[in-house]
Amino acid sequence: MEAADKRRFRTAVLKWYDQHGRKLPWRESADPYRIWLSEVMLQQTTVAAVVPYFERFTARFPDVQSLAEADVDEVLRLWEGLGYYSRARNLHRASQAVVSEHAGQFPSEVEALQTLPGIGRYTAGAISSFAFDQPAAIVEANTERLYARLLALREDVRASASQKLLWQFAEELVPEKRAGDFNQALMDIGSKLCRPVDPDCESCPLQKFCGVFQQGLQKEVPVRKPAVAVTPISELAVVLMDRERFLLRRRTESERWAGMWDFARFEISSEESATLPLVQKRGRSKSLFSPEGLELPEFAVQKTQSQIGLKPGPVVASMEFSYSVTRYKVQLICFACSAHRARGKLSDGVQWFSLEELPELPLSMTGRRIADWLKVR
Protein backbone atom coordinates (compact mmCIF):
# COMPACT_ATOMS: atom_id res chain seq x y z
CA MET A 1 0.00 0.00 0.00
CA GLU A 2 1.38 3.40 -0.99
CA ALA A 3 2.07 6.03 1.69
CA ALA A 4 -0.87 8.20 0.63
CA ASP A 5 -3.21 5.21 0.71
CA LYS A 6 -1.95 4.29 4.18
CA ARG A 7 -2.80 7.80 5.42
CA ARG A 8 -6.28 7.61 3.92
CA PHE A 9 -6.74 4.11 5.34
CA ARG A 10 -5.79 5.22 8.87
CA THR A 11 -8.04 8.26 8.66
CA ALA A 12 -11.00 6.13 7.57
CA VAL A 13 -10.38 3.62 10.37
CA LEU A 14 -10.17 6.21 13.13
CA LYS A 15 -13.13 8.24 11.85
CA TRP A 16 -15.28 5.10 11.90
CA TYR A 17 -14.05 4.19 15.39
CA ASP A 18 -14.90 7.62 16.80
CA GLN A 19 -18.48 7.11 15.67
CA HIS A 20 -19.03 3.35 16.01
CA GLY A 21 -16.45 1.89 18.41
CA ARG A 22 -17.80 -0.60 20.96
CA LYS A 23 -18.24 0.53 24.55
CA LEU A 24 -16.58 -2.17 26.66
CA PRO A 25 -15.69 -2.10 30.38
CA TRP A 26 -11.96 -2.60 29.80
CA ARG A 27 -11.87 0.37 27.44
CA GLU A 28 -12.92 2.78 30.16
CA SER A 29 -9.30 3.42 31.14
CA ALA A 30 -5.78 2.85 29.86
CA ASP A 31 -4.91 0.68 32.86
CA PRO A 32 -2.56 -2.01 31.51
CA TYR A 33 -3.72 -4.45 34.19
CA ARG A 34 -7.36 -4.29 33.07
CA ILE A 35 -6.36 -4.40 29.41
CA TRP A 36 -4.11 -7.42 29.97
CA LEU A 37 -6.82 -9.21 31.95
CA SER A 38 -9.46 -8.57 29.28
CA GLU A 39 -7.22 -9.72 26.45
CA VAL A 40 -6.37 -12.98 28.19
CA MET A 41 -10.04 -13.62 28.97
CA LEU A 42 -11.04 -12.90 25.37
CA GLN A 43 -8.76 -15.61 23.99
CA GLN A 44 -11.04 -18.38 22.64
CA THR A 45 -14.03 -16.65 24.32
CA THR A 46 -16.72 -14.23 23.14
CA VAL A 47 -17.07 -10.67 24.41
CA ALA A 48 -20.55 -11.37 25.79
CA ALA A 49 -19.25 -14.29 27.85
CA VAL A 50 -16.24 -12.36 29.14
CA VAL A 51 -17.96 -9.21 30.47
CA PRO A 52 -19.47 -10.73 33.67
CA TYR A 53 -16.25 -12.65 34.42
CA PHE A 54 -14.19 -9.51 33.91
CA GLU A 55 -16.40 -7.52 36.26
CA ARG A 56 -16.30 -10.19 38.99
CA PHE A 57 -12.56 -10.68 38.60
CA THR A 58 -11.69 -6.98 38.81
CA ALA A 59 -14.03 -6.52 41.78
CA ARG A 60 -12.07 -9.17 43.68
CA PHE A 61 -8.63 -8.36 42.24
CA PRO A 62 -8.69 -4.64 41.36
CA ASP A 63 -4.97 -4.42 40.62
CA VAL A 64 -1.95 -6.56 39.83
CA GLN A 65 -0.77 -6.52 43.46
CA SER A 66 -3.98 -8.08 44.77
CA LEU A 67 -3.87 -10.77 42.08
CA ALA A 68 -0.23 -11.56 42.82
CA GLU A 69 -0.99 -12.00 46.53
CA ALA A 70 -4.03 -14.25 45.93
CA ASP A 71 -4.12 -17.98 46.40
CA VAL A 72 -4.12 -19.74 43.02
CA ASP A 73 -7.19 -21.78 44.06
CA GLU A 74 -9.22 -18.59 44.42
CA VAL A 75 -8.03 -17.39 41.01
CA LEU A 76 -9.03 -20.69 39.43
CA ARG A 77 -12.40 -20.65 41.21
CA LEU A 78 -13.23 -17.20 39.81
CA TRP A 79 -12.09 -18.38 36.38
CA GLU A 80 -14.30 -21.46 36.51
CA GLY A 81 -16.49 -21.71 33.43
CA LEU A 82 -14.23 -19.74 31.08
CA GLY A 83 -12.21 -22.83 30.20
CA TYR A 84 -8.58 -23.03 29.05
CA TYR A 85 -7.48 -22.86 32.66
CA SER A 86 -3.80 -22.47 31.83
CA ARG A 87 -4.75 -18.85 31.11
CA ALA A 88 -5.71 -18.34 34.76
CA ARG A 89 -2.55 -19.99 36.06
CA ASN A 90 -0.43 -17.85 33.74
CA LEU A 91 -2.31 -14.73 34.87
CA HIS A 92 -1.36 -15.54 38.44
CA ARG A 93 2.29 -16.24 37.54
CA ALA A 94 2.56 -13.13 35.37
CA SER A 95 1.08 -10.91 38.09
CA GLN A 96 3.72 -12.18 40.51
CA ALA A 97 6.44 -11.49 37.93
CA VAL A 98 5.17 -7.93 37.38
CA VAL A 99 5.28 -7.30 41.13
CA SER A 100 8.64 -8.97 41.79
CA GLU A 101 10.53 -8.04 38.62
CA HIS A 102 8.92 -4.76 37.54
CA ALA A 103 7.97 -3.16 40.88
CA GLY A 104 4.28 -3.67 40.13
CA GLN A 105 4.39 -1.71 36.87
CA PHE A 106 3.71 -3.29 33.50
CA PRO A 107 6.45 -2.68 30.95
CA SER A 108 5.36 -0.75 27.86
CA GLU A 109 7.56 -2.44 25.26
CA VAL A 110 6.38 -5.50 23.35
CA GLU A 111 9.63 -7.39 23.89
CA ALA A 112 9.55 -6.91 27.68
CA LEU A 113 5.86 -7.85 27.88
CA GLN A 114 6.55 -11.11 26.02
CA THR A 115 8.88 -12.25 28.81
CA LEU A 116 5.87 -12.52 31.16
CA PRO A 117 4.14 -15.94 31.48
CA GLY A 118 1.30 -16.43 29.01
CA ILE A 119 1.88 -13.21 27.05
CA GLY A 120 2.50 -13.80 23.36
CA ARG A 121 2.99 -11.49 20.42
CA TYR A 122 -0.65 -10.44 20.06
CA THR A 123 -1.32 -9.82 23.77
CA ALA A 124 1.94 -7.87 24.10
CA GLY A 125 0.95 -5.71 21.13
CA ALA A 126 -2.51 -5.12 22.57
CA ILE A 127 -1.17 -4.01 25.98
CA SER A 128 1.55 -1.86 24.43
CA SER A 129 -0.80 -0.07 22.04
CA PHE A 130 -4.00 0.09 24.14
CA ALA A 131 -2.39 1.10 27.44
CA PHE A 132 0.73 3.00 26.31
CA ASP A 133 -0.24 4.03 22.75
CA GLN A 134 2.92 2.47 21.37
CA PRO A 135 2.81 1.74 17.60
CA ALA A 136 2.60 -2.02 18.14
CA ALA A 137 0.78 -4.23 15.63
CA ILE A 138 -1.78 -6.89 16.47
CA VAL A 139 -3.14 -9.93 14.65
CA GLU A 140 -6.00 -11.86 16.27
CA ALA A 141 -9.13 -13.58 14.95
CA ASN A 142 -10.96 -10.44 13.80
CA THR A 143 -7.98 -8.56 12.38
CA GLU A 144 -6.60 -11.74 10.81
CA ARG A 145 -9.82 -12.11 8.82
CA LEU A 146 -9.90 -8.40 7.96
CA TYR A 147 -6.27 -8.29 6.80
CA ALA A 148 -6.71 -11.47 4.74
CA ARG A 149 -9.68 -9.91 2.93
CA LEU A 150 -7.93 -6.59 2.41
CA LEU A 151 -5.05 -8.50 0.81
CA ALA A 152 -7.33 -11.01 -0.97
CA LEU A 153 -5.11 -13.70 0.50
CA ARG A 154 -5.96 -17.02 -1.14
CA GLU A 155 -3.70 -19.16 1.09
CA ASP A 156 -4.51 -20.79 4.43
CA VAL A 157 -4.37 -17.92 6.94
CA ARG A 158 -2.90 -20.20 9.63
CA ALA A 159 0.08 -21.23 7.48
CA SER A 160 3.39 -19.78 8.68
CA ALA A 161 3.95 -17.86 5.43
CA SER A 162 0.48 -16.31 5.67
CA GLN A 163 1.01 -15.35 9.31
CA LYS A 164 4.30 -13.69 8.42
CA LEU A 165 2.59 -11.72 5.64
CA LEU A 166 -0.33 -10.66 7.87
CA TRP A 167 1.94 -9.47 10.68
CA GLN A 168 4.08 -7.55 8.21
CA PHE A 169 0.96 -5.91 6.78
CA ALA A 170 -0.27 -5.00 10.29
CA GLU A 171 3.09 -3.48 11.20
CA GLU A 172 3.09 -1.35 8.05
CA LEU A 173 -0.39 0.02 8.77
CA VAL A 174 -0.23 0.86 12.50
CA PRO A 175 0.18 4.64 12.99
CA GLU A 176 2.59 6.40 15.34
CA LYS A 177 -0.29 8.22 17.06
CA ARG A 178 -3.57 6.72 18.31
CA ALA A 179 -2.18 3.24 17.72
CA GLY A 180 -4.41 1.80 20.43
CA ASP A 181 -7.58 3.30 18.97
CA PHE A 182 -6.50 2.18 15.50
CA ASN A 183 -6.00 -1.43 16.59
CA GLN A 184 -9.25 -1.55 18.52
CA ALA A 185 -11.05 -0.02 15.55
CA LEU A 186 -9.80 -2.79 13.27
CA MET A 187 -10.92 -5.40 15.81
CA ASP A 188 -14.38 -3.79 15.92
CA ILE A 189 -14.64 -3.56 12.13
CA GLY A 190 -13.68 -7.21 11.92
CA SER A 191 -16.24 -8.17 14.54
CA LYS A 192 -19.15 -5.97 13.50
CA LEU A 193 -18.74 -5.66 9.72
CA CYS A 194 -16.11 -8.03 8.34
CA ARG A 195 -17.86 -11.05 9.84
CA PRO A 196 -16.86 -14.63 9.03
CA VAL A 197 -20.21 -15.17 7.29
CA ASP A 198 -22.25 -12.52 5.49
CA PRO A 199 -19.86 -9.54 5.86
CA ASP A 200 -21.49 -6.13 5.73
CA CYS A 201 -19.33 -4.70 2.94
CA GLU A 202 -21.76 -1.88 2.17
CA SER A 203 -21.24 -0.37 5.64
CA CYS A 204 -17.48 -0.93 5.74
CA PRO A 205 -15.28 2.19 5.70
CA LEU A 206 -12.47 0.16 4.11
CA GLN A 207 -14.42 -0.96 1.07
CA LYS A 208 -12.22 0.84 -1.45
CA PHE A 209 -9.07 -0.67 0.07
CA CYS A 210 -10.43 -4.22 0.11
CA GLY A 211 -9.16 -6.80 -2.36
CA VAL A 212 -11.95 -9.34 -1.84
CA PHE A 213 -14.66 -6.68 -2.24
CA GLN A 214 -13.18 -5.55 -5.53
CA GLN A 215 -12.87 -9.15 -6.74
CA GLY A 216 -16.10 -10.48 -5.22
CA LEU A 217 -14.28 -13.07 -3.11
CA GLN A 218 -15.94 -12.44 0.26
CA LYS A 219 -17.15 -16.04 0.57
CA GLU A 220 -13.78 -17.51 -0.37
CA VAL A 221 -11.48 -15.54 1.95
CA PRO A 222 -10.12 -16.22 4.49
CA VAL A 223 -9.00 -19.69 3.53
CA ARG A 224 -8.74 -22.22 6.34
CA LYS A 225 -8.00 -25.90 6.45
CA PRO A 226 -11.07 -28.06 7.15
CA ALA A 227 -11.86 -28.46 10.84
CA VAL A 228 -10.50 -31.56 12.53
CA ALA A 229 -13.16 -34.27 12.83
CA VAL A 230 -14.73 -34.72 16.25
CA THR A 231 -13.56 -37.88 18.04
CA PRO A 232 -16.00 -39.65 20.38
CA ILE A 233 -14.50 -41.01 23.61
CA SER A 234 -15.81 -42.36 26.91
CA GLU A 235 -14.78 -41.42 30.43
CA LEU A 236 -15.50 -42.90 33.82
CA ALA A 237 -15.61 -40.80 37.00
CA VAL A 238 -15.66 -42.46 40.41
CA VAL A 239 -16.77 -40.52 43.50
CA LEU A 240 -15.82 -42.08 46.85
CA MET A 241 -18.33 -41.06 49.52
CA ASP A 242 -18.09 -41.27 53.29
CA ARG A 243 -21.40 -39.94 54.60
CA GLU A 244 -21.24 -36.28 53.53
CA ARG A 245 -17.55 -36.31 52.61
CA PHE A 246 -16.18 -36.79 49.11
CA LEU A 247 -12.69 -37.68 47.89
CA LEU A 248 -11.09 -35.41 45.29
CA ARG A 249 -7.64 -35.12 43.74
CA ARG A 250 -5.74 -32.12 42.44
CA ARG A 251 -4.99 -32.59 38.77
CA THR A 252 -1.31 -32.53 37.84
CA GLU A 253 0.48 -30.07 35.56
CA SER A 254 0.53 -32.59 32.70
CA GLU A 255 -3.25 -33.06 32.72
CA ARG A 256 -6.13 -31.08 31.27
CA TRP A 257 -7.53 -28.68 33.91
CA ALA A 258 -4.15 -28.70 35.66
CA GLY A 259 -4.31 -27.45 39.23
CA MET A 260 -8.08 -27.90 39.47
CA TRP A 261 -9.72 -30.32 41.91
CA ASP A 262 -11.53 -33.28 40.40
CA PHE A 263 -12.98 -36.66 41.21
CA ALA A 264 -11.18 -39.80 40.09
CA ARG A 265 -11.63 -39.80 36.33
CA PHE A 266 -10.10 -41.64 33.39
CA GLU A 267 -10.73 -42.49 29.76
CA ILE A 268 -12.09 -45.95 29.06
CA SER A 269 -12.28 -48.08 25.93
CA SER A 270 -15.51 -49.26 24.35
CA GLU A 271 -14.70 -52.77 25.60
CA GLU A 272 -14.29 -51.49 29.17
CA SER A 273 -17.46 -49.43 28.89
CA ALA A 274 -19.39 -52.55 27.99
CA THR A 275 -18.37 -54.21 31.29
CA LEU A 276 -19.70 -51.41 33.53
CA PRO A 277 -22.70 -52.18 35.77
CA LEU A 278 -26.02 -51.81 34.06
CA VAL A 279 -27.87 -48.69 35.17
CA GLN A 280 -31.22 -47.26 34.23
CA LYS A 281 -33.04 -43.95 34.51
CA ARG A 282 -35.81 -43.63 37.06
CA GLY A 283 -38.67 -41.59 35.62
CA ARG A 284 -37.49 -38.24 34.29
CA SER A 285 -34.55 -38.01 36.66
CA LYS A 286 -31.15 -37.36 35.16
CA SER A 287 -29.65 -39.68 37.76
CA LEU A 288 -29.13 -43.35 37.11
CA PHE A 289 -29.60 -46.03 39.72
CA SER A 290 -27.86 -49.34 40.31
CA PRO A 291 -28.89 -52.30 42.47
CA GLU A 292 -27.54 -51.95 46.02
CA GLY A 293 -24.20 -53.60 46.64
CA LEU A 294 -23.14 -53.63 42.98
CA GLU A 295 -19.36 -53.58 42.55
CA LEU A 296 -17.31 -51.84 39.87
CA PRO A 297 -15.39 -54.10 37.48
CA GLU A 298 -11.75 -54.77 38.33
CA PHE A 299 -10.30 -52.41 35.71
CA ALA A 300 -12.28 -49.51 37.22
CA VAL A 301 -11.21 -50.45 40.74
CA GLN A 302 -7.55 -50.55 39.74
CA LYS A 303 -7.62 -47.29 37.79
CA THR A 304 -9.42 -45.53 40.64
CA GLN A 305 -6.90 -46.79 43.17
CA SER A 306 -4.00 -45.70 40.96
CA GLN A 307 -5.33 -42.12 41.05
CA ILE A 308 -6.52 -41.69 44.62
CA GLY A 309 -4.97 -44.58 46.56
CA LEU A 310 -8.20 -46.20 47.71
CA LYS A 311 -10.23 -49.03 46.25
CA PRO A 312 -13.88 -47.99 45.89
CA GLY A 313 -16.62 -49.85 47.74
CA PRO A 314 -20.12 -50.74 46.48
CA VAL A 315 -21.93 -48.49 44.02
CA VAL A 316 -24.48 -46.15 45.62
CA ALA A 317 -25.73 -44.16 42.60
CA SER A 318 -24.77 -43.26 39.06
CA MET A 319 -25.29 -40.56 36.46
CA GLU A 320 -24.09 -39.78 32.96
CA PHE A 321 -23.86 -36.84 30.59
CA SER A 322 -21.94 -35.77 27.51
CA TYR A 323 -19.71 -32.76 26.93
CA SER A 324 -17.31 -31.43 24.32
CA VAL A 325 -13.70 -30.36 24.80
CA THR A 326 -11.38 -29.31 21.96
CA ARG A 327 -11.93 -31.98 19.27
CA TYR A 328 -13.50 -34.60 21.52
CA LYS A 329 -17.13 -35.49 22.22
CA VAL A 330 -17.06 -37.17 25.62
CA GLN A 331 -19.65 -39.49 27.12
CA LEU A 332 -19.02 -39.48 30.87
CA ILE A 333 -20.44 -42.05 33.29
CA CYS A 334 -20.08 -41.33 36.99
CA PHE A 335 -20.43 -43.87 39.80
CA ALA A 336 -20.75 -42.72 43.40
CA CYS A 337 -19.31 -45.47 45.60
CA SER A 338 -19.27 -46.05 49.32
CA ALA A 339 -15.95 -45.57 51.08
CA HIS A 340 -17.10 -47.79 53.97
CA ARG A 341 -15.12 -50.75 52.66
CA ALA A 342 -12.53 -48.71 50.76
CA ARG A 343 -8.99 -50.02 51.17
CA GLY A 344 -5.60 -48.40 50.66
CA LYS A 345 -3.70 -45.19 51.47
CA LEU A 346 -4.55 -41.76 50.05
CA SER A 347 -2.28 -40.66 47.21
CA ASP A 348 -0.48 -37.30 47.26
CA GLY A 349 -2.77 -34.43 46.29
CA VAL A 350 -5.89 -36.33 47.37
CA GLN A 351 -8.17 -34.94 50.08
CA TRP A 352 -11.59 -35.37 51.68
CA PHE A 353 -14.02 -32.46 51.36
CA SER A 354 -17.44 -31.92 52.87
CA LEU A 355 -20.50 -31.15 50.78
CA GLU A 356 -20.36 -27.57 52.08
CA GLU A 357 -16.74 -27.16 50.91
CA LEU A 358 -17.33 -28.27 47.32
CA PRO A 359 -18.74 -24.90 46.11
CA GLU A 360 -15.51 -23.18 47.17
CA LEU A 361 -13.19 -25.50 45.25
CA PRO A 362 -11.96 -24.69 41.74
CA LEU A 363 -13.48 -27.40 39.55
CA SER A 364 -13.81 -27.88 35.82
CA MET A 365 -17.29 -27.40 34.35
CA THR A 366 -17.80 -31.15 34.33
CA GLY A 367 -16.47 -31.51 37.86
CA ARG A 368 -18.90 -28.82 39.00
CA ARG A 369 -21.72 -30.69 37.31
CA ILE A 370 -20.87 -33.82 39.27
CA ALA A 371 -20.61 -31.80 42.51
CA ASP A 372 -24.02 -30.23 41.88
CA TRP A 373 -25.48 -33.70 41.28
CA LEU A 374 -24.08 -34.89 44.62
CA LYS A 375 -26.01 -32.14 46.39
CA VAL A 376 -29.38 -33.25 45.03
CA ARG A 377 -28.97 -36.98 44.39
Image (cartoon, rainbow, N blue to C red):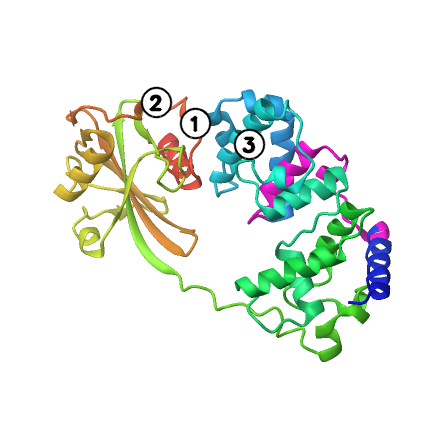
Which residue range is magenta in the image? 18-45
Query: Whole-percent x and y of residue 149?
Result: 68, 68
Look at the numbered disc 2 and give the secondary structure of its residue: strand
Q: Amino acid at mark 2?
A: Phe
Question: Mark 3 against mark 1, which lies toward the viewer?
Answer: 3
Q: Which mark is residue 23?
A: none
Whether residue 34 appears in magenta in the rendering, the answer is: yes
Query: Whole-percent x and y of residue 125?
Result: 66, 45
The picture quadrant where one finds residue 123 is top right
Which residue is depicted at the point 70% across and 74% down?
212
| Residue ID for mark 2 | 353
Instruction: Find the residue positioned furthest to the bottom.
Output: 215
| Residue ID for mark 3 | 94
Q: Quadrant of the C terminus?
A: top left
Image vertical order of residue 214 relative to residue 340, above or below: below
Q: Evaluate if marks 2 and 1 touch, with contact meaning CB atoms under 8 Å apart.
A: yes
Is most of the magenta stretch helix, strand or loop? helix
Q: Amino acid at mark 1?
A: Leu
Instruction: Find the residue positioned furthest to the left.
Output: 298
| Residue ID for mark 1 | 361
Which residue is depicted at the point 82% across and 62% down?
6
